[in-house]
Image (spheres, rainbow, N blue to C red):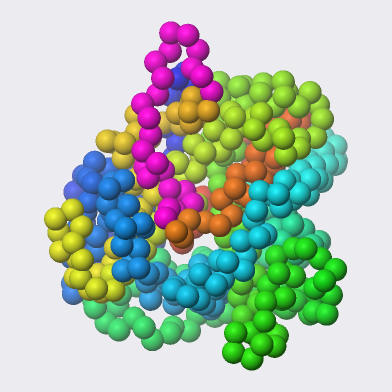
């Protein structure tokens, strides 16, 4: 296994459970900071908050029940719909039943392996442009520069989404999109008091002023993209044309503008926000683990020999992919997946009352003491030696249960863009890692904070220098 003993930043572990009020106050600030030490051992957790129960499925068996076996009983919660509804409407991330199946079916062709192979050229080219921009800034900055890595990764992933899914360049709107998504998410509270007090949650809630302003800027960019494409659908083979070509179920005519915009917004959110965060965390982890970073650079140099990566190289860069997978284990892009029980159920011998919150928490599952060896350590080898035969004399890693690792969710609602994201990440990491070495600003505090997605609370300012 990797010789580094680096334990990445994480919130302090609590020795015991907080009282309901303290737990809710803490969760409003950072939901991953609320879990006591026992949560990292338990297979199923239950706690009552005033009039409502919260259950955490925290083992492969209980996760399977919620996300596979009885998935129809656990739709997205009203609270999640209130939080994200203004941004993405009743699009694929929030819809259920027939609506969700239709939306998934409509979008699937855009994520076929043949399309991802085609998109890989754009992914690599976009990353190369980012590398060139860094080089120009380094020349102007006297040999090195410092940039906030969350913003940098958001810029490149936003461009990838636009160019592959919508055949459009964002240009100077890339920063507008990133900052607007950031402001919208920062304006949300992960947990509200009324949710746990059993008060009605089906009434829509008006977003806070800051969120409304961010939403208006996002909608302005998306509206322009839709208007520019109307009447030209046949000229493109991307997701936007696919969505515009699908007729309205009731009228047979064009689908409502807002419906199209909501579906574009969910792909921006899921395809840009989450991947950007995962990439930023990856650079942080590499900067703190010298032996991992060396193997990362060595593999890139050996495979690419100075050229730009292509789709075929993704399979030839297993260590790069393993580094990214380990980053998503330690810092899952969506650290908690919340559901609400439609009807009474039973999990692990416990009765689940209708209306209870039931969640799968990748943050806990990925650090579970019974599922992972040294779970708090950064060790890409745990994924690498699933892909590559271990050297002679090395004990093969214990087989990992598929449902111990769910960065893209699981079951029928697994993220449709999982393969897209993995391909994109490897090509971006290989392109930038081929030319540059990144270092976290000395003494900078690193604190993972969950506000729907998992971001570094104080950002990740990193020095970039040529290798």
Percent across and percent down for residue 146 are 70, 42
Query: In the displayed structure, does residue 378 sit left or right of residue 108?
Result: left
In the image, 221 versus 388, the foreground residue is: 388
Residue 410 at what x, y percent from top left?
43, 53
Res. 141 visible in picture: no
Q: Residue 308's quadrant in the figure?
A: top right
Q: Residue at x 72, y 39 (%)?
A: 311
The residue depicted at 59 percent of the width and 55 percent of the height is 417
Seen as rendered, the residue at the extreme top is 393
At a point 20% along the width and 66% down the height, the residue shown is 345
Query: How far from the left and from the top, in percent, is residue 289?
Result: 53, 27
In front of the other: 195 or 388? 388
Is 406 included in the stretch rendered in magenta? yes
Specify start and end residues of the magenta stretch as a single range. Answer: 388-411
Magenta-span inclusion, residue 126: no
The C terminus: image quadrant: top right
Q: Nearer the viewer, residue 357 or 246?
A: 246
> Please, is residue 54 above or below residue 50 in the view?
above
Image coordinates for residue 40, horizontal then vertical, percent: 27, 43
Image check: 354 left or right of 146? left
Q: How many marks?
A: 0
Q: Is residue 368 left or right of residue 100?
A: left
Please say if 315 is above or below 295. below
Q: Quadrant of the N terminus?
A: top left
Q: Residue at x 29, y 56 (%)?
A: 65
Judged from this view, the residue extending furthest toward the bottom is 251
Secondary structure that dominates the magenta span: loop
Would residue 281 be seen by someone viewing this image from the given angle? yes
Query: Is 177 drawn above or below residue 279 in the view shown?
Result: below
Looking at the picture, tell me which residue is in the foreground, 340 or 183: 340
């Amino acid at each position: 296994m990797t010789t580094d003993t680096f334990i990445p930043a994480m919130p302090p572990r609590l020795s015991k459970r907080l009282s309901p009020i303290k737990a809710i106050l803490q969760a409003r600030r950072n939901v991953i900071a609320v879990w006591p030490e026992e949560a990292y051992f338990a297979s199923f957790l239950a706690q009552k908050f005033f009039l409502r129960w919260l259950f955490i499925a925290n083992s492969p068996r209980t996760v399977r029940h919620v996300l596979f076996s009885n998935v129809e009983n656990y739709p997205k919660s009203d609270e999640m719909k209130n939080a994200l509804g203004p941004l993405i409407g009743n699009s694929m991330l929030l819809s259920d039943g027939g609506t969700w199946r239709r939306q998934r079916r409509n979008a699937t062709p855009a994520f076929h392996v043949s399309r991802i192979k085609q998109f890989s050229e754009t992914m690599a080219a976009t990353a190369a442009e980012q590398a060139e921009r860094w080089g120009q800034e380094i020349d102007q900055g006297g040999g090195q520069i410092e940039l906030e890595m969350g913003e940098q990764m958001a810029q490149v992933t936003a461009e990838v989404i636009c160019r592959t899914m919508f055949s459009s360049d964002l240009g100077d709107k890339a920063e507008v999109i990133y900052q607007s998504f950031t402001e919208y998410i920062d304006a949300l509270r992960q947990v509200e008091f009324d949710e746990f007090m059993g008060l009605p949650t089906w009434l829509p809630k008006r977003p806070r002023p800051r969120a409304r302003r961010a939403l208006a800027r996002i909608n302005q960019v998306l509206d322009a993209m839709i208007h520019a494409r109307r009447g030209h659908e046949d000229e493109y083979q991307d997701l936007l044309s696919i969505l515009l070509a699908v007729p309205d179920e009731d009228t047979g005519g064009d689908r409502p503008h807002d419906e199209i915009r909501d579906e574009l917004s969910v792909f921006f959110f899921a395809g840009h926000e989450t991947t950007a965060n995962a990439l930023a965390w990856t650079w942080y982890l590499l900067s703190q683990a010298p032996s991992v970073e060396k193997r990362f650079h060595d593999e890139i140099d050996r495979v690419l020999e100075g050229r730009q990566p292509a789709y075929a190289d993704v399979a030839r860069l297993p260590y790069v992919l393993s580094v990214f997978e380990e980053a998503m284990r330690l810092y899952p892009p969506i650290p908690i997946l919340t559901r609400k029980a439609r009807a009474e159920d039973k999990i692990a011998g416990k009765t689940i009352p209708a209306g209870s919150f039931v969640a799968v928490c990748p943050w806990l599952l990925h650090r579970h003491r019974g599922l992972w060896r040294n779970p708090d350590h950064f060790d890409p080898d745990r994924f690498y030696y699933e892909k590559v035969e271990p050297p002679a004399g090395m004990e093969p890693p214990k087989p990992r249960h598929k449902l111990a690792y769910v960065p893209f969710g699981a079951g029928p609602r697994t993220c449709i863009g999982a393969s897209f994201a993995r391909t994109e990440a490897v090509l971006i990491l290989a392109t930038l890692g081929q030319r540059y070495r990144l270092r976290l600003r000395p003494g900078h505090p690193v604190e993972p904070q969950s506000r729907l997605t998992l971001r570094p609370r104080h950002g990740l300012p990193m020095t970039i220098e040529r290798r």
